[in-house]
Amino acid sequence: MKSITLHGIDTDLDQKISIKSREYGLSQNKTVKLILQNTLQSDPRSNKRDNFSDLFGKWTTKEKSDFEARIKDFEIVDVMDWEK
């Protein structure tokens, strides 16, 4: 397996890596590898979906039909609203 050495890591980044490694309970090396894997090997679209997963795809059939019944009035076009 290939090894990479990183030079010139500033104090702020070093502290952030240390904090993350304590949070994860991993060595700094394993933490950096995990961060790189999550960043470089993930599908960016799935990350966006995961961020909002609690907001979509959760309605039951009854909730959907109730919602559609409530907005039914908004689908009616009154021609008088569009005449001068």
Image: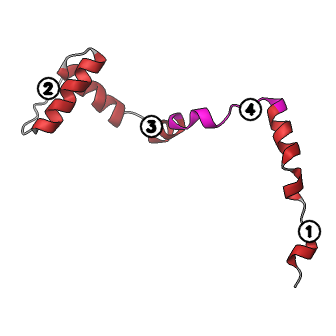
**Which one is earlier in the sequence, the residue at label 1 or at label 3?**
3
Query: What residue did someone put label 2 on?
Result: 3
Instruction: State the residue position of label 3.
Output: 43
SS at mark 4? loop
Mark 3 or mark 4, whichever is nearer to me: 4
Q: For the residues marked 2 and 1, what is the alpha-carbon distance in whole angstroms?
A: 69 Å
Q: Position of residue 45 (x, y in %)?
A: 49, 41
Quarter holding residue 73: bottom right
Element type where label 2 sits in the image: loop
Q: Which residue is mark 1?
A: 78
For the residues labelled 1 and 3, the Cα–Cα distance comes to: 45 Å
Q: Quadrant of residue 6?
A: top left
Seen from the viewer's position, the closer of residues 75 and 1 is 75
Q: Amino acid at mark 1?
A: Asp
| Residue that carries the numbered disc 4 in the rendered image | 59
Where are the magenta residues, as a range?
A: 50-62
Residue neighbourhood size for the residue with mark 2, other residues' Cα within 10 Å, grouped as few (<14), some (14–19), many (≥20): few
